Image: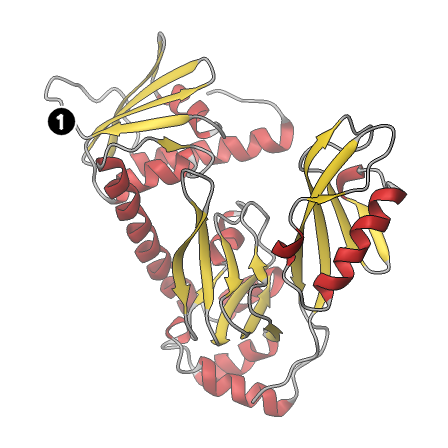
Amino acid sequence: MIYFLPVMLKIVAVCDEEQGCPLYRRDNRLDFATPIVNGVDGVPICSIAVETLQKNVVKITAGEMSTNFAHTFCGGCQGGKAWWSFEPVVKDTDATLSPGAQQVILNSIGRMKIFAGVHMAKLLRIVKLIKGTRVPEGRAIVNRGHPGEAFYIVLDGECEVMGVDENGNETVLAVLPGGECFGEMSLITGEPASATVRAKNDVTILMVSRENFNMMLSIAPEIAITLARILAARLANTGRRVIEELKKGLAGRLDLISPAELIQAMNVNSQTGMIAVQSGDKQMTIYLHDGQIHEVQMGDKTGEEVFFEFLSWQKGNFRFDPVRRNDTQKQVQMDTVGLLLEGMRRVDEYKQTGIWRKS
C-alpha cells in the first residue's frame, strides 16, 4: 500500500446565474485557496458572497461532494442576487516519493500498456517525474472546458469519463480501471478538456505535470507512439458513437460536440453525406465523400475559408444526412486532416489576438 500526503485542494466557485448583480456575471469565477480568495481574471471580491460561499468551501475541502452545493444563493443585497456552484481542483502533492514508494510505482508502471517496451533505465528516470495522490469517490479530477494541468494514470480504483447528452444531463462515456490514463489530449493540443473525469470510487492517481510530461516524452519517445495509438482508438470509438447517433436522425449541438470533433468523427469513420449547420442567422452545408470534405457553402460563400470560420463556432445546431451525391466535383482541394490542422491554428490565433486572419 502506498500512502500519500493529503490532497491539497483549491475550490473554484463559478457563477451560474445572476439577477441584477452589480459585480458578477455568469461564468465569473472566485478561486478559494484557503485562506486566500482571488477573483479570476480581475473579477471583484464581494464580502457578502465570500462569507456565504466559504462555508460550503470548508465542507467540500473536508470531503463532501461539491455537487451537494450546486446553485448556492450568495445571500443577496440591494444591488442584486447571484447563484454559484463549486469545482474542486486536485492539486499535486509537494512531497517527493520515498524510495520505497518509487519502487512500488516502478513495479506497477512496468506492467502498464502506456509504458510497454520502455527500457528499465528510462523508467527509473520517469518515476522521478511522477507524483501521486488519493482522490475520494465522486471528486472531479479533470473538468470539462478547463485547460489540462497534468497527465494522469489510474494506479488503483476506477474513474468515470462523464459527458453531457442533448438534454444537458450527465452520462457516463467510459470507465477507466487501473492502468488506464487520461488528460494527455489537452496537454498535446492545448485545447480545454472535452470531458469531465471523476473518481468512481476512492482511487490512487499518478500525476505527471505539464512540464514533466514533455520531459517524459523526451526521455522515452516511444511513449508518444503508444499515446498516439490510444488516442486513435478513442477517437474511432467516439466517432462511431457520434455517427450512430446521427444516423438515427438526431440533431446535434455544437456546445456538446465541437465542429472539429464532428469533422474528425466523419473523417475517421469515412462517412459520406451532408451536414447542415445553423448558428444564429448563419446557415452552412458541408458535403463529405468517404470522410473527405468536397463542398462547403454558406450563402454565396464557398470553400476553405468558410470551413475555417465554421471551426470557430461554439454554438449552433447541426444535422447529418447520409446521402451520396454523384454530381459533385471536389470544391475543397486540401485533405480534411490538413484542413483541421490549419483551421485549428487559425482558431487558436483568433483566441489570442481577437483578429480573424484570412489567406
Residue 121 percent across, percent down from the top left: 49, 84
Residue 44 percent across, percent down from the top left: 84, 38
Residue at the limit of the structure toward the top, as seen here = 300
* Type of amino acid at the residue the image marks with label 1: Arg
Figure check: 185 above or below 324: below
User: Is residue 200 found left or right of 236 in the rendered image?
Assistant: right
Q: Classify 10 Å Cα crowding around label 1: few (below 14), some (14-19), many (20 and above).
A: some
Instruction: Count every numbered label the image shows and give the total.
Output: 1
Rendered-image quadrant of the N terminus: bottom right
Name the residue carrying label 1: 324
Residue 306 percent across, percent down from the top left: 40, 19
User: Is residue 118 found left or right of 42 in the rendered image?
Assistant: left
- Say which of 167 and 281 sits in front: 167
Residue 294 percent across, percent down from the top left: 24, 25
- Say which of 167 and 24 sits in front: 167
- Say which of 74 and 113 sits in front: 74
Residue at the limit of the structure toward the left, as seen here = 326
At 53% from the left and 54% from the top, the residue drawn is 187
Figure check: 322 above or below 270: above
User: Is residue 324 found left or right of 338 in the rendered image?
Assistant: left
How are the residues colored? secondary structure
User: Is residue 336 found left or right of 146 in the rendered image?
Assistant: left
Tell me where residue 271 sits by quadrant. top left
At 53% from the left and 68% from the top, the residue drawn is 216
At 72% from the left and 48% from the top, the residue drawn is 13
Figure check: 73 above or below 342: below
